[in-house]
Amino acid sequence: MKTNLKPLLIALMGAAVFAGCKKDGNNANGITPGKEVNAVNSKFISKVYEYLPAPGQFINESLGSLAGAQRIIGDVSQTGMVSLGGYGGYIVFGFDHSVINRAGHDFTIYGNPLGPVLQWSEPGIVMVSQDVNGNGLPDDVWYEVAGSEYTSPSTIKNYQITYTNPKATADVNWTDNQGNSGKVEVNQFHRHNYYPLFAPNQETLTFNGTLLRSTWGMEGSIYVNRAFTYGYADSWSTGDYYEQNMFNSFDIAWAVNSAGQPANLSKIDFIKVYTGQNEKGNTMLGEISTEVRGAVDLNIN
């Protein structure tokens, strides 16, 4: 999280359990997954279905609250921003139509990375799903968008991490299925409990997914977290020209199944983003935590 380097637009909403996307039973805003785009559709996010962050310095503040997640809905020039916290924290959103898999990149996700020279990237893994059962809910199979690190030997598939609620203003302990343990450390700028107090389970939180290697380090006296080449949210910045910049946009054709084979999706209805690195950063900038501040269907002008 890089609030001391770049102004943040406040955001957030939703809640649920990470494993398999909870059904909220509510489609009141008129989303019709599977429906082809027409003249009245918006290219911006229309609904946030779920938001469950991992522990982090902005969690339980406005940037990491249930109510705030709703503010990534709509025109990205006017939206707020949501923090996903440490590794595994996620958000699920969709448009008021299906995003069609056309030639080239199909959608872009806005974050707040810094770069490209001295980079501060907080890469989020992107997953997509098609509303196969037609119920308007994100409860079908999810497919990972295979970014540049997907086949890297340093990328860990089937990673699992568990955070324990300290129930106090204290570091949040974690353990993982690789035999490691550590802490999400409280810093002097955000002194409160970093464990999401709106999480369904107030004892522990467990997240599963793909773990990206750390890119954290220093360039001279400046802290950096290097971007990956392509395929990750909040990872690369060459300015705010997201629609024209391949580093910030995504092709549905990149989606793969659990065996790493092309998913061959003709369209998608739901997008999930979760923090892909488990890195505490430093005491000034805090943990690496992906931010999302909106998304755009690139097939709509």
Image (cartoon, grey):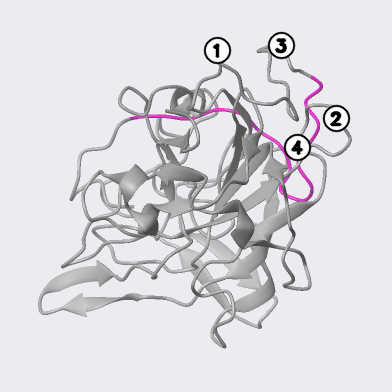
Q: CA–CA distance between discs 3 and 2?
A: 15 Å
Residue marked by disc 4: 138
Q: CA–CA distance between discs 3 and 4?
A: 15 Å
Residue marked by disc 1: 40
Please report whichever mark, 3 or 2, sits nearer to the chain's N-terminal start: 3
Q: CA–CA distance between discs 2 and 1?
A: 21 Å
Residue marked by disc 2: 134
Question: Label 4 neighbourhood size at 10 Å, few (<14), some (14-19), many (20+)?
Answer: many
Classify residue 66 as left or right of residue 29.
Answer: left
Q: Where's residue 10, x and y in %?
A: 35, 29
Classify residue 181 as left or right of residue 247.
Answer: right
Range of residues picked out in magenta: 10-25
Which structural element holds mark 1? loop
Classify residue 210 as left or right of residue 200.
Answer: left
Question: Label 3 neighbourhood size at 10 Å, few (<14), some (14-19), many (20+)?
Answer: few
**Is residue 184 positioned above or below 271 on the image?**
below
